[in-house]
Image (cartoon, helix red, strand yellow):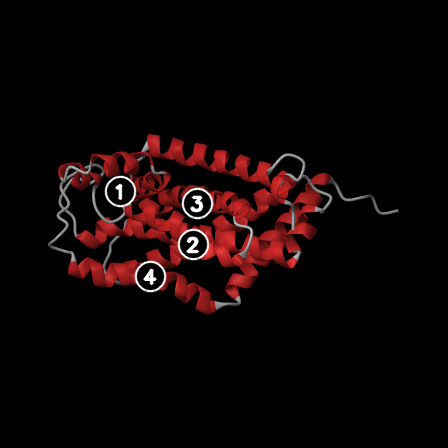
Amino acid sequence: MTPAPSHQVHLLRAARAIVGREVGKFLRQPARLASALVRPLLWLIVFAAGFHNVFGVAIIPPYETYIEYKVYMVPGLLGMIALFNGMQSSLSLVYDREMGMMRLLLTAPLPRGWLLAFKLLAGSALSLLQMLVFLLIAGLLGVEFKPLQLLATLPVLLLAAALLAALGLMLSVHVRQLENFAGAMNFVIFPMFFISPALYPLWKLEEAGAQTLHLLALVNPFSHAVEAIRFALCGQVNGVSLLVLAGGTALCFVLALRGYDPQRGWMRQRGAN
């Protein structure tokens, strides 16, 4: 008689099914990768040229010399890719809930936390894949990176992707219908992206007297995602930003887990679909 599969085997099968489904669907849609890269590449090619002499970048950590504006932009554009993909993953969750796939997933004989963790892993993997392709294209466009520093950046890229995927997971709890998703995305994405050091150093805001915006940028988790990537690409470690990324990922995941719990979360308050 064949013994029953162990709990670890069940987890591996569930991870392969959930992550494999998302990655496989993405790989079967090359237009999705192209559309995901159009936006950051447009910023890198057009805005870097147009604003080259507008945004002067002082010698600030982690930089030890003056740099080209396109070099400064790359960490912010990597964060942009992860941010938009995190919201796209949120859209996928809302769609699955409306189509009934989420109900089937959450009734699987595995703890709800593991199922959502695999969803988070799938979203993070897709973000990492897109960021790596962008780095390859950026290198072809003349943005130079040291190979060893790129390897050291991979865990930071994955952690930043996990934070933004967890944010999307939490957001999917609140967005009940696909029709409301575009407004929710704009409300989250654009403030997080523009009130951050993605396109300009934060001292520019302070120098301009925009103290409120400067304070918001300092507490913006996306700012820490960008800064962690920026330091990693220079072979340095920003400990504060890494702690914010890890803590923010854990917090967003716990809130999402509570939201998807029909006994305690928002799904009970609003009625599960």
Question: Badge 3: how crowded within 10 Å, few (<14), some, or many (20+)?
Answer: many
* Real-space Cα separation, disc 2 to disc 4, in angstroms: 19 Å
Q: Residue at x 26, y 59 (%)?
A: 43
Residue 8 position within the rendered picture, expressed as x and y whole percent measured from the top left = 68, 40
Query: If you read the primary sequence from the N terminus, does the residue marked by circle 2 or circle 4 appear first?
Result: 4
Disc 3 target residue: 164
Going by the numbered disc 1, the residue's amino acid type is: Cys
For discs 1 and 3, the disc positioned in front in the rendered view:
3
Going by the numbered disc 2, the residue's amino acid type is: Gly
Going by the numbered disc 3, the residue's amino acid type is: Leu
Disc ID at residue 234:
1
At mark 4, the secondary structure is helix
At mark 2, the secondary structure is helix
Disc ID at residue 39:
4
Q: Residue at x 43, y 54 (%)?
A: 183
* Real-space Cα separation, disc 2 to disc 1, in angstroms: 36 Å
Toward the viewer: 138 or 117?
117
At mark 3, the secondary structure is helix
Going by the numbered disc 4, the residue's amino acid type is: Arg
Given the current orientation, which residue lies at the most extreme front position?
270
Disc 2 target residue: 183
Asked if disc 2 and disc 1 are in contact, CB closer than 8 Å, the reply is no
Q: Residue at x 30, y 45 (%)?
A: 233
For discs 2 and 3, the disc positioned in front in the rendered view:
2
* Real-space Cα separation, disc 1 to disc 3, in angstroms: 22 Å
Query: If you read the primary sequence from the N terminus, does the residue marked by circle 4 or circle 1 appear first?
Result: 4
Query: If you read the primary sequence from the N terminus, does the residue marked by circle 2 or circle 1 appear first?
Result: 2
Residue 129 position within the rendered picture, expressed as x and y whole percent measured from the top left = 44, 55
Question: Badge 2: how crowded within 10 Å, few (<14), some, or many (20+)?
Answer: few
